[in-house]
Image (cartoon, coloured by chain):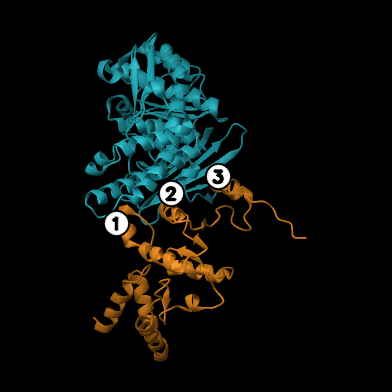
Chain colours: A cyan, B orange
Amino acid sequence: MKVRQIQFVHFRNHRAFTFEPGDGLNIIYGSNGSGKTTILEGIHYCALTKSFLSIYDSEFVTYGKTFFLINGLFVNVKEKLTSIKVTYSRDTGKQVSVNTRNVPTFSEHVGTVPCITFSPADILIVNGAPAERRRFLDKAISQMDVKYLQALIQYRRLLQQRNALLLLIRDRQADQNVLDILTEQLVEKAAIIVYARREFIEGIMPCVISKLRIVSGGENPSLTYRCTFQNDDDVPHKDSMANHLFGHLKARRSEEIARGQTAAGPHRDDILFALDEKEIKKYASQGQKRTFIISLKLALYDYFQEHQKEKPICLLDDLFSELDSKRVSALLSILADFGQTLITSTEKRTASYINSVNIHDLI
Amino acid sequence: MIQPLEELVEALCTLPTIGRKSAWRLALHLMERPEQDALKLAESIVRVRQKLTRCKRCYNYSETELCPICSSASRDQKQICVVEKPVDLFAFERSGRYRGVYHILGGVLSPLNGITVDKLRINELSMRIINEQPGELILGLGGSADAETTALYLARIYRQQGIRVTRLARGLPVGMELEYVDQITLSQALNERTDVHYES
């Protein structure tokens, strides 16, 4: 998938602005606050209907205006054009249309424009709470597997209901007879999620190893899924995973009721990242962490490509900061073989395969 | 400014989907139409509130102790269709296909909103099942996640009692083009496919 043209109206500091990136590696450079990242955000909105920096829709409206509009023209591997329009105003909320057809549920649209993002805030995937790592997994898998996203949405809803019921039971406002039903529904979705996550981690691991080797020159990474209801050496088969979690929750029921919370499941699971068998969060340097995250993101490219016909678009915000020149040129050599890539940077870089764009020439 | 008119607007505002602007439009409309029309509306509101109670068997609105459906000899009293609210009952009735009776649950289970088993007419349903010994219980609940939980719950307790429990089929809407059907619905329709019967 490639962006042919992206048009903004009242989107942050872009009041009325059109950008046409090149097909290969694009580096958008310019001073701080000139709106480089905003271009990436706009493309991300078209692909995944929201911001990659988790900024609220309302905050993208140019100060003093009432709405924003993004109009993206995309072309797929068969040269077929798709026009994606995202509008937001406080009164009507967010609307997405594909080829002028309105998209009623955004989850249906997710995955049609595969896209990989990197931003300096992604360091949280290593440093932050487990929720950050789960978000990384969920975003990556959802783009490839609509059923995963559906299961995830249903799981979250069931989890809220179940936790609410546990609280009611604790306060003696409900008895336990509905709990079994909710638990059965919950574990069924949980099994789909955990199975897909394990499969994803297994699949992406070789890609992470090869990418990190090129960028860092020899570190050996590993990714391990940390499940709250099963041991790593005793992973139940896909079909018995739901039963396993059901039994686990049943055994912890009194604890669950006392806390009013579901004790185990994909909402509590984590991944462990290690470099040469040492946990990255604790032992790696800032530069190593950053290199690892970038390799993880670049590995997604290979993984997506293996599982989908479309090459993903790479949106890499401020990719080169904190990296030494050796790592930068290693990264550029990888990206030269990728599909369409957009990188923001404060400095200009030139090479035959780079389309260097000065943002100040655009606006 | 004009006290009675403002009061009417306030009252209309409390209705669902009616905002201030619509309330003003409705109030002025009532003033501008012949007086009779407005009085007729007022009378019918009074009448439904004073004359209608709930049917003591199915809990639908009724003028009599037993609603016309529950007291009809031509309805199959051994087939009970469980619905969430009266408007669902009217939907079934419009289809003209159903000849059994109903039970209005008054909502679906949703612990998040404080709706537990005792907030719904589930005990009443259990009593009916003991008294009436129906041959079939049809779960005519909607497709939401909460409706699903409720259906599974009811199915479990009544199946344990040996009652035949059925649910509405889920799948393709009639007249729908396949290419526009979403993946989830289509795979559901495939799961619940039925044999084709030839009439000869």
Amino acid beneath label 3: Gln
* Mark 3 neighbour density, 10 Å: few (under 14) some (14–19) many (20 or more): few
Per the image, the residue denoted by label 2 is: A87
Callout in the foreground (2, 3): 3
Rounded to the nearest angstrom, the CA distance separating label 2 from label 1 is: 36 Å
Element on which disc 2 rests: strand
Element on which disc 3 rests: helix
- For the question of whether residue A48 can be seen, the reply is yes
Q: Chain of mark 1?
A: B
Tell me which residue sits at (57%, 35%) in the image: A75
Element on which disc 1 rests: loop
Residue A305 position, x and y percent, is 53, 26
Quick check: do tags 2 and 1 share a chain?
no
Tell me which residue sits at (46%, 42%) in the image: A150
* Mark 1 neighbour density, 10 Å: few (under 14) some (14–19) many (20 or more): some
Q: Which mark is residue B114?
A: 1
Q: Residue furthest top?
A: A218
